[in-house]
Image (spheres, rainbow, N blue to C red):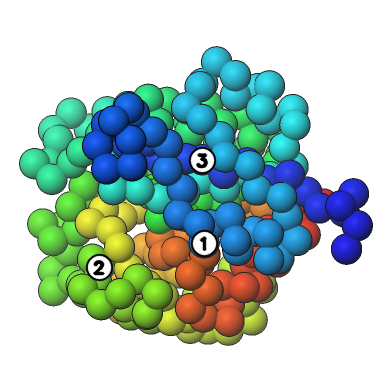
Amino acid sequence: MSNIALPLIGVTLDSEQPGGYSKYPWYALRANYAEALAQHGAIPVGLPHDPARAEAVLDRIQGLVVTGGAFDIDPSHYGEQDVHATVTLKADRTAAEFALVRGALARNLPVLGICGGEQLLAVALGGKLIQHILDAIEHPLEHEQTNPRHQPGHEVSVVPGTLLHQIVGAGRMAVNSAHHQAVRDPGPFARVNAIAPDGVIEGIEDIRYRFCLGLQWHPEFQIDQGDRKIFQAFIAAAR
């Protein structure tokens, strides 16, 4: 494949405080995010947390992946003042990701939100979140699965007629699960495309855009055949 055909995909990075890898603050990205993008025909590039340069970044990339992480979005972003005791914040990261997502949507660049990235995408589209599934859903599944993340935690039903259904060509997918929050309302124009057996929203999309897809699971582990198709469709949209 010619390098000219390989789209440049911006991938948001996580941030960590001193300790472990470095005695200074550091960025982090699980290797399989980058590997999945490269495997399916893209050049991934990590994006630091700099909202002021979001537009300059968006001038140079052909698509955006908003990754997950062990943190939450400030509920004030979706109109809630009460904060659940389990909520943890990374304000700088959230500010940068909002700038990138809103700018990407304004340019109609393909956007793929994964896990916490799906939740941020939903809020950017005017939606709301469940702050803690265990306190909001009756008889919930184990959405923070105890088995390894490279194994499935549960299945989801894929909603017929959605972009996701068109991409994966199946009514069900096996997915991993690593979240204590979820989308409550996808926003006025977005729609739900995947649902867990307990009713928790597992995917959203907004067909006003060329490619605007959010997934609560981590398709970069490529557990289900549909995960590979998702990356292929995203990268095709970025070309």
Amino acid of disc 1: Asn
Front-most of residues 174 and 1: 1
Mark 2 vs mark 3, foreground winner is 3
Q: Nearer the viewer, residue 126 or 179?
A: 179
Query: At numbered mark 1, what does the secondary structure look like: helix, strand or loop?
Result: helix
Tag 2 or tag 1, which sits nearer the N-term?
Answer: 1
In this rendering, position of residue 126 left or right of residue 65: left
Residue drawn at the location 13% of the way across and 33% of the way down: 82
Q: Amino acid at mark 3?
A: Thr
- Residue 188 at x, y percent in the picture: 48, 44
Q: Find disc 2 in the rendering and name its residue.
A: 143
Q: Residue at position x 13%, y 45% from top?
A: 86
Measured as percent of width and height from the top left, residue 211 is found at: 67, 52
User: Disc 3 designates what residue?
Assistant: 12
The N terminus appears in which quarter of the rendering? bottom right
Asked whether 19 or 205 is in front, the reply is 19
Tell me: 153 left or right of 213. Answer: left
223 left or right of 135 in image: right
Location of mark 1 (residue) = 32
Q: Position of residue 139 (x, y in %)?
A: 13, 74
Q: Please report whichever mark, 2 or 3, sits nearer to the chain's N-terminal start.
A: 3
Q: Nearer the viewer, mark 1 or mark 2?
A: 1
Give the residue drawn at x 68%, y 21%.
56
Q: Residues at badges 2 and 3 in contact (C-beta under 8 Å)?
A: no
